[in-house]
Amino acid sequence: MIKLAVIGTNWITERFLSAALESGKYQLSAVYSRSLEQAKAFADKFSVNLTFDCLDKLAACDDVDAVYIASPNSFHAPQSIKMMKQGKHVICEKPIASNYQEAQLAYQTAQENNVVLFEAFMSPYLPNFQQIKSHLPSLGAIRKAHITYCQYSSRYPKYLNGENPNTFNPEFSNGSIMDIGFYCVGSMVELFGEPTSIQAQAHLLDSGVDGNGSIICGYDGFDVVVMHSKTSDSYVPSEIQGEEGAILAEMISIGQKVTKVNRGGETEDLTLEQNANPMFYEAFKFAEQVESNQMDMQAVERSLLISKVTTEIRKQTGVVFPADN
């Protein structure tokens, strides 16, 4: 059993813990929050006694093998590095870092301390995403792709009312491209690798982050159009077009439904049954790497490429974080 601690006590931490415990690979051993009272309230839900409001004490704790980090984006790399320097394996919510330089430093720290650093980007590990990937060759030469994730944020009304929620605050390295836009860029990189060109535009909010945006990424013989938004909803699936057919993916981030349309119009449902909690697969994959004490270098390369691409997108669109300095 991997003795797991969590940093962060929000809904996503509960969802990950549900998946991790279901995998049978983990036991929750400790909870951290800036508020010890909040840490204890969260720990009580899982009958855990060990709680912290000091990161240094958590990092030094011998009763912890690995740490799941679900704090605001700007803390991801610094907290990961602090934990890894004390010999802890880390699974960190996406994005792994605020920018490419931080991401490089984080993975360098993992290698120097012989621990696993894993970016909690669930999409590539989902059976239905693997369906997309495995059926790409059947499309023939790829000619177009459209990857989209647009969802009106539940925090947007608060922003419009004059509040400054983390979701739209550059202090926390947030905004559309760093949140749901990450799934689009990450899916693109997983399927097609590094683009040869990037053209990005975004509509910035007064806070300085992007509320929505679009990117055209060039590849050999085709381009990928990415659309992301936290200020509007979309009901259009992502699509990959080839000379012999197309693949449609509803909610590509969680692999809701995958359909292949052959040239001529014949359709084929490629959808597989998945675990109800899409985080199950990333939790299991991280556990495998911890047990072997070896990082999946293909996943590391993907993580670094995503960070490189999103950093370039922000550069082009004028989204600047304090962490960039």
Image (cartoon, rainbow, N blue to C red):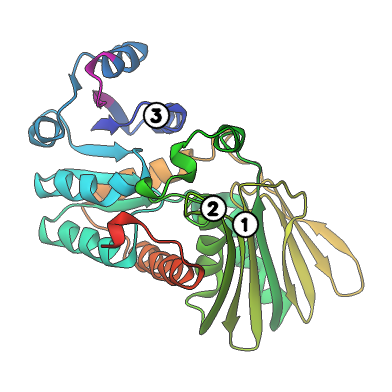
Type of amino acid under label 2: Ser
Task: Kindly check if marks 2 and 1 are in contact, taking CB atoms under 8 A apart as contact.
Answer: yes
Front residue of this view, candidates 308 and 270: 308
The residue shown at (65%, 88%) is: 221
Q: Mark 1 falls on what kind of element?
A: strand
Q: Which residue is mark 3?
A: 17
Type of amino acid under label 3: Leu
- Residue 176 seen in render: yes
Placement of the C terminus among the 4 image quadrants: bottom left
x, y percentage for residue 318?
Answer: 47, 66
Which labelled disc corresponds to residue 313? Answer: none
Among the two numbered marks 2 and 1 on one chain, the one whose residue lies closer to the N terminus: 2
Taking the image as shown, residue 59 lies to the left or right of residue 305, namely left
Q: Mark 3 falls on what kind of element?
A: helix
Placement of the N terminus among the 4 image quadrants: top left
State the separation of the CA atoms marked 2 and 3: 25 Å
Type of amino acid under label 1: His
Among the two numbered marks 1 and 3 on one chain, the one whose residue lies closer to the N terminus: 3
Q: Which residue is mark 2?
A: 176
Vertical order, 188 against 5 (above or below): below
Is residue 36 inside the magenta stretch?
A: yes
Q: Mark 2 falls on what kind of element?
A: loop
State the separation of the CA atoms marked 1 and 3: 28 Å
Other-residue count near label 3 (Cα within 10 Å), few / some / many at <14 / 14–19 / ≥20: many
x, y percentage for residue 143?
Answer: 71, 81
State which region is magenta: 28-37
Q: Which residue is mark 1?
A: 228
Is residue 269 inside the magenta stretch?
A: no
